[in-house]
Amino acid sequence: MPGEFLKYEKGIVHINYGRSRSKRCKFCGNPYREGKACDYPISEGKTCDAEMCSSCSRTLGRQDTDLGGGLIRPHDTIDVCPHHRDKAVVKDGKLQPEQPNLF
């Protein structure tokens, strides 16, 4: 991602990441420039973050992500990797971890 816009209490700020280098997808091995990170929650406050190309990711929806310090990433996509796409559940606009079977 070469740059992004973030909202905060005084307005909107643009963060420029400069030139992006090509990376390789963790799942298919193909090179990509603007990939995605898996948003599946694996523990309290931590997500999978597996880097992947757009072809391997599945977008489940959008949300405003609180980055802390008053910064919000508006309309952030909720993306999951191939390992978590069957386990992911979106409830009330938030990605929920898989619920264990009780029986």
Image (tube, grey):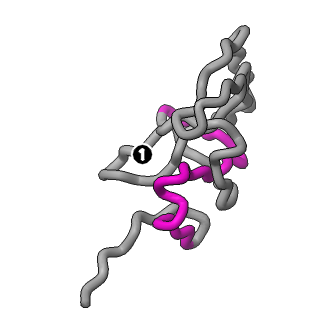
Q: Which residue is mark 1?
A: 47
Percent x, y of residue 68 = 48, 36
Percent x, y of residue 74 = 70, 44
Q: Nearer the viewer, residue 17 or 50?
A: 50
Horizontally, residue 3 falls left or right of residue 52, namely right
Percent x, y of residue 7 = 68, 36
Q: Nearer the viewer, residue 87 or 4?
A: 87
Asked whether the viewer can see residue 71, the reply is no
Residue 1: quarter of image: top right
Q: Which residues are magenta?
A: 69-91
Horizontally, residue 5 falls left or right of residue 73, namely right
Amino acid type assigned to the residue bearing label 1 in the image:
Thr
Asked whether the viewer can see residue 17, the reply is yes
Q: Nearer the viewer, residue 81 or 70?
A: 81
Q: On screen, 2 above or below 49? A: above
Label 1 neighbour load within 10 Å: few <14, some 14-19, many 20+: some
Question: Residue 13 lies in magenta, yes or no?
Answer: no
